[in-house]
Image (cartoon, grey):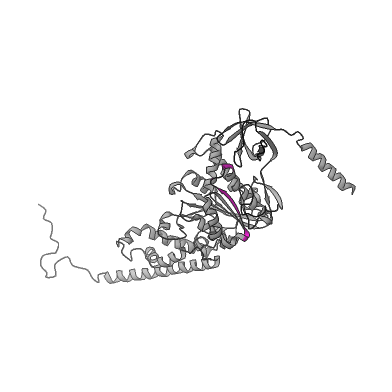
Amino acid sequence: MVAEARTAIARASQALRHADLARRRGCVRDLIGLIVEATGVQVEVGEVCMVGESRGRPRVATEVVGFRCGRTLLMPLGELHGIGPGTPVHPTGAPFRVAVGESVLGRVIDGLGAPVDGREPPQAGAWRHTTAAPPDALSRPRIRDLVGLGVRALDGLVPCGRGQRLGIFAGSGVGKSSLLGMIARSTTAEVNVIALVGERGREVREFIERDLGEALEHSVIVVATSDQPALVRIRAAFTATAIAEYFRDQGRHVMLMMDSVTRFATAQREVGLAIGEPPATRGYTPSVFALLPRLLERAGTSPSGSITGLYTVLVDGDDMNEPIADAVRSMLDGHIVLTRKLAQGGHYPAIDVLQSVSRLIGEVVSPEVHRAAQRVCAALAAYHEKEDLISIGAYQAGSDRVLDSAIAMRPRIEAFLRQPVDQQSTIADAHQELLSLASGLDTEAGASHDTEAGSRQTSRPKGRVPVSSPAGGDPAIPMLQLS
């Protein structure tokens, strides 16, 4: 009993030593664009301040984003109505936190953790800071287990390991949200955490009811629409990651899906330009490229659980090498490319498997499946290279065994790559069909080789053909007369 009392007293004294007993209050000096400039406060970058309490208006939450000429730069996490010169600023002494726990499953919340589904706020099992350090590099277990995505083309040709991070690169209107919905309904992960960053308000309900469906029961949706402040859109990405980290620390295997990283980067560009950062590549500020790894590296494996990350990238003008796409591709463990050409041809999901890469395919699938995937991709590459010749009828069958087998097996390969949105697939089904395709390609290549050998044997002359004419007269090829 005495020991417990001493421990409690020691904790209380330590809390008093580290407590800020002086409550400081500042005031607003200027408000230019999205930036609120305040004086008289002693705060840190990332700390939340409450601005308001004048004329009976509610307080507005703001976040410290920088300092300039002795003034504190704040950006709002809500509307700026009611803020003016002299409005009091109250520091909270802590960064932004979000409520986490089992009660958030099946809920739709905004970027600040408030419910938007018309229900009561979720009960906080714990509070968690939205900014956190990723697991140590040497503490991350190696990725060896395969996680099912429910899409044949991905499970077979672009497999995803448990704890792997994949990017989905596509232009607008190519099918990113539909693909995410297919994965959320069919994945073998225990919990889905889905962040919709900068989405149109109309698409949110469509995604939940049409694409997600019954998978909402074991999912958490974090929404920040395009009309909300830039900081809220940024905070939505970090809030979703913090919720995923909570379930990972509970020993769960989490699927974190974010749509999209491009809008997250655009929001950070707005913040950077507002506080005076110089624009760099295509107008993106240096802080954008510094913030991306701090977000993406938090997914992955840990000693307790794993977070498998799927991040969509909205490429500008279908340019796969634009700055954000290039930076994200270099940080992730693979990429899935959706092309507009396939989508326009009615090929869904519009996955271009030749441009898509999983860097862990050799770690998570058997050697037989890996060889079968290489065989199918080689056939697709051969067909793609000679597609123009085939379409105009200029290709002569028998001149390329690999291409002949690809032409013969193309209907089956197309059927494997296409999949209706409401159709589910398992890893075992995808691998079995992939092995069957590889076996069929080998069989067709062998048949083409036998046919080609037979045609050569038939066309080969049996004896030496004389140069002279059959009648024994003058030679068919006259001699040259040299003068």
What residue sits 31% from the left and 64% below the top? 396
Q: What residue sits 70% from the left and 33% below the top?
A: 25
Looking at the image, can residue 330 be seen? no
* Residue 203 placement (x, y as % from top left): 52, 54
Percent position (x, y) of residue 286? 54, 38
- 354 or 225: which is nearer to us? 225
Question: Does 21 sit above or below residue 395?
Answer: above
Q: Residue at x 62, y 61 (%)?
A: 217
Total marks drawn?
0
Is the residue 156 above or below the residue 99 in the image? below
Closest to the observer, 393 or 104: 104
Q: Nearer the viewer, residue 438 or 415?
A: 415
Q: Picture coordinates of residue 128 (x, y %)? A: 68, 48
Q: Residue 126 at x, y = what percent? A: 71, 51
- Magenta stretch bounds: 217-231
Q: Is residue 89 visible?
A: yes
> Hey, which residue is sitting farthest top in the picture?
69
Does 365 appear in magenta? no
Residue 227 lies in the magenta stretch = yes
Identity of the residue furthest to the front in this view? 55
